[in-house]
Image (cartoon, coloured by chain):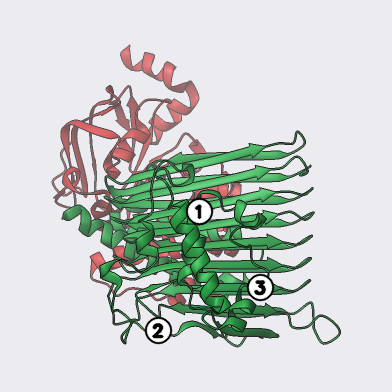
Chain colours: A green, B red
């Protein structure tokens, strides 16, 4: 038997023997994910869906404007080939090794992924270390993913070399595809930042209404590295965005922001940050808007280990129902094992600011325009706070993106309300 | 106080706020282009009158009527009132985080222009007008690019209200203590703007305790609001008397 096949069978065996995520699993208590069969492509709806136009391009790389791209080594690898599979999964946590422990309740997603994964992309950004590389230059990239099959498990591995500064826009968008067939997507992404490397990462995931997707991102930061991620996500049949960020080297900094929009759909954002070294800093901030019969969960968990002296931690979760009777759960959670740290967290759940709404209407804006403008403003401020450098937001035209996302959310919410 | 030709005609207006009778009976008329000054002690109902006319949902109309430009004002939504030409400045204008001031004002202005049957202003034309108006009002141009009232001082917030007033050019403006928190130059800017808009036909209800400002505005009438009722109507002499003796002494004189 070839080694790729053996690896797949081992993952499948692990899933069969250990079982899927139990309903009482703490991390998924409020929004249990669909059963294992769904993520393995074994459900009837997913069979025979390989035909065009669903067979998208998978991962594709694009420039952003006329900005310099720097040196990027990108390799598209076939997980069915022994050698390429070995290269694709090289250095990633093994299914039975220590790296698996960190996955906790979500480990079955990793096993299902290993079973179904057919291809992946590995990127090494900054090229070979040495005199060839200009450490001070910024690498600008857009990474687009389009589904290749009705049930898939894409893999992405990004390695940012020491001192490199990268701006990355990652989009998962089905709007441009003609095919409206629901997809199942279990994506795993691994991000490794070398010493003093900086990654500004804007992720946009707007699946189709009946899609079931789960994106798992694992980031590990080197000494003095900075990882800033802003997510714009819309709900679907099931949508999970899960980040696990390790700050296990001194002075590593992480900032995570989420604009979450669910109109009669399902969306969960989980951010787990682990502080394992001194003078590490993290911030998690989410703005969650839900309407109709949406079910949304925001789960922020930050752990400060005994070794993380002078850690600085902030969590701020805001949930706003924008119509109907959505279920919106905000869960800020801190776990502190050191006395000398700074930590704040909070969750607010409520309507849009009434005084600002009235002010806008008194100046002539109708209720819907006022609501859209205020929500857009809140989202824009969230993005500004996430990124230490506003060039990314300017380059991607964040105002336009936010306006479109908020308009779509409010329009769907209004339709659902009238229905 | 019936004026068939009045732009705003308020009759026996009674307003409750959180089960408290704040306005007990207010009647007044504002002809087009006129300027009324409204004076009154703290808690007498001045801001309540303005916010009720604007349609604030927390202010419940218990009785009476208000007609504006021939329409039943109280039946209109807040935005319909604004589009009909009513502008109410806020004593404490709120912040709108993340919404750029120029975008906010342009969106509002174009909503009002559309209601008037005018073409919308594009960003370029709007910015030209906004910059010129901001300069006249002493508002730094940078404030146009910042989020609405976010980090603005008290005086800057009031100037920002005046900027919107200047650009929206309403038929009736209710200015609620627009001079408070303003420096001398700011007060002068208020006077100049009010004069300029009056010359174009805008009517005003100005709430103020500042005699020098009131004199500069040359009001058509001064109204004294006391405990939710119009206690007295007069001219500059009434304003001067109130400024000299205070509201308590003036009330005693009225009872005598």
Q: Is residue A380 above or below residue A78?
A: above
Secondary structure found at label 3:
loop
Q: Give how far apart the Cα atoms at labels 3 and 2 are.
A: 26 Å
Residue B203: percent from left, percent from top: 31, 51
Instruction: Look at the numbered discs 1 and 2 and tell me whether their residues touch, using CB distance below 8 Å.
Output: no
Q: Earlier in the sequence, mark 1 or mark 2?
A: 2
Q: Nearer the viewer, residue B240 or A54?
A: A54
Q: Which residue is mark 1?
A: A106
Secondary structure found at label 2:
loop
Circle nearer the viewer, 3 or 2? 3
Q: Which residue is mark 3?
A: A90
User: Based on the displayed image, in which of its 4 quarters is residue B202 positioned?
Assistant: bottom left
Q: Earlier in the sequence, mark 1 or mark 3?
A: 3
Residue A35: percent from left, percent from top: 36, 56
- Looking at the rendered structure, whether the residues under marks 3 and 2 are on a common chain is answered as yes
Q: Give how far apart the Cα atoms at labels 1 and 2 are.
A: 27 Å
Q: Give how far apart the Cα atoms at labels 1 and 3 are.
A: 21 Å
- In the picture, measured across the screen, residue B4 lies left or right of residue B169, that is left
Q: Which mark is residue A56?
A: 2
Q: How many marks?
A: 3
Q: Earlier in the sequence, mark 3 or mark 2?
A: 2
Instruction: Look at the numbered discs 1 and 3 and tell me whether their residues touch, using CB distance below 8 Å.
Output: no
**Number of other residues with Cα within 10 Å of mark 1, as a class: few under 14, some 14 to 19, many 20 or more:** some
- In the picture, measured across the screen, residue B77 lies left or right of residue B255, that is left
- Looking at the rendered structure, whether the residues under marks 1 and 2 are on a common chain is answered as yes
Regarding residue B255, the answer to whether it shows in the image is: yes
Location of the C terminus of chain A by quadrant is bottom left
């Amino acid at each position: 038997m070839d080694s790729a096949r053996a690896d797949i069978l081992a993952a499948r065996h692990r899933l069969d023997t250990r079982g899927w995520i139990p309903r009482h699993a703490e991390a998924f208590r409020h929004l249990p994910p669909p059963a294992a069969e769904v993520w393995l492509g074994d459900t009837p709806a997913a069979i025979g869906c390989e035909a065009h136009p669903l067979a998208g391009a998978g991962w594709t790389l694009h420039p952003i404007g006329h900005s310099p791209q720097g040196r990027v080594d990108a390799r598209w690898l076939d997980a069915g080939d022994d050698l390429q599979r070995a290269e694709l999964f090289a250095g990633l946590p093994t299914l039975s090794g220590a790296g698996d422990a960190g996955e906790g309740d979500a480990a079955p997603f990793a096993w299902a992924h290993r079973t179904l994964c057919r291809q992946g992309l590995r990127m090494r950004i900054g090229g070979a270390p040495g005199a060839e590389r200009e450490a001070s230059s910024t690498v600008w990239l857009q990474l687009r993913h389009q589904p290749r099959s009705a049930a898939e498990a894409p893999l992405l591995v990004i390695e940012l070399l020491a001192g490199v500064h990268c701006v990355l826009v990652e989009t998962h968008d089905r709007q441009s595809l003609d095919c409206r067939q629901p997809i199942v997507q279990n994506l795993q992404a691994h991000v490794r930042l070398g010493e003093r490397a900086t990654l500004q990462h804007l992720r946009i995931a707007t699946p189709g209404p009946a899609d079931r997707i789960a994106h798992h991102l694992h980031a590990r930061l080197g000494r003095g590295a900075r990882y800033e991620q802003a997510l714009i996500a819309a709900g679907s049949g099931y949508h999970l965005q899960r980040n696990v960020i390790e700050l296990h080297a001194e002075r590593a900094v992480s900032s995570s922001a989420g604009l979450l929009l669910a109109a009669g759909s399902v969306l969960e954002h989980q951010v787990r940050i682990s502080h394992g070294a001194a003078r590490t800093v993290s911030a998690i901030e989410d703005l969650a808007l839900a309407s109709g019969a949406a079910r949304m969960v925001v789960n922020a968990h930050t752990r400060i280990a005994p070794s993380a002296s002078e850690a600085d931690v902030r969590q701020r979760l805001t949930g706003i129902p924008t119509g109907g009777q959505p279920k919106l759960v905000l869960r800020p959670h801190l776990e502190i094992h050191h006395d000398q740290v700074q930590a704040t967290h909070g969750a607010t759940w409520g309507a849009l600011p009434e005084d600002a709404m009235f002010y806008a209407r008194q100046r002539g804006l109708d209720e819907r325009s006022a609501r859209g403008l205020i929500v857009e403003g809140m989202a824009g401020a969230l993005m500004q706070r996430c990124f230490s450098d506003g060039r990314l937001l300017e380059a991607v035209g964040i105002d336009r993106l936010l306006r479109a996302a908020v308009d779509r959310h409010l329009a769907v919410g209004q339709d659902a309300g009238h229905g | 106080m019936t004026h068939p030709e009045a732009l705003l005609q308020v009759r026996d207006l009674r307003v409750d706020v959180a089960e408290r009778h704040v306005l007990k009976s207010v009647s007044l008329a504002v002809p087009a282009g006129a300027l009324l000054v409204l004076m009154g002690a703290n808690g007498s109902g001045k801001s309540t009158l303005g916010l009720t006319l604007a349609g604030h949902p927390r202010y419940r109309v218990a009785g009476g009527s208000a007609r504006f430009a021939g329409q039943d004002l109280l039946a209109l939504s807040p935005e319909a009132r604004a589009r009909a030409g009513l502008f109410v400045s806020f004593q404490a204008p709120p912040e709108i985080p993340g919404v750029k001031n120029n975008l906010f004002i342009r969106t509002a202005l174009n909503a009002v222009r559309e209601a008037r049957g005018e073409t919308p202003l594009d960003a370029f034309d709007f910015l030209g007008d906004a910059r010129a108006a901001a300069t006249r009002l002493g508002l730094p141009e940078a404030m146009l690019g910042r989020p609405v009232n976010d980090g603005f001082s008290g005086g800057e917030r009031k100037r920002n209200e005046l900027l919107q007033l200047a650009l929206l050019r309403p038929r009736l403006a209710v200015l609620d203590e627009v001079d408070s928190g303003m420096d001398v130059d700011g007060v002068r800017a208020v006077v100049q703007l009010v004069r300029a808009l009056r010359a174009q036909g805008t009517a005003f209800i100005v709430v103020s305790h500042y005699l020098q400002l009131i004199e500069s505005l040359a009001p058509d009438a001064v109204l004294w609001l006391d405990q939710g009722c119009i206690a007295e109507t007069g001219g500059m002499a009434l304003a001067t008397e109130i400024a000299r003796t205070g509201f308590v002494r003036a009330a005693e004189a009225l009872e005598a």
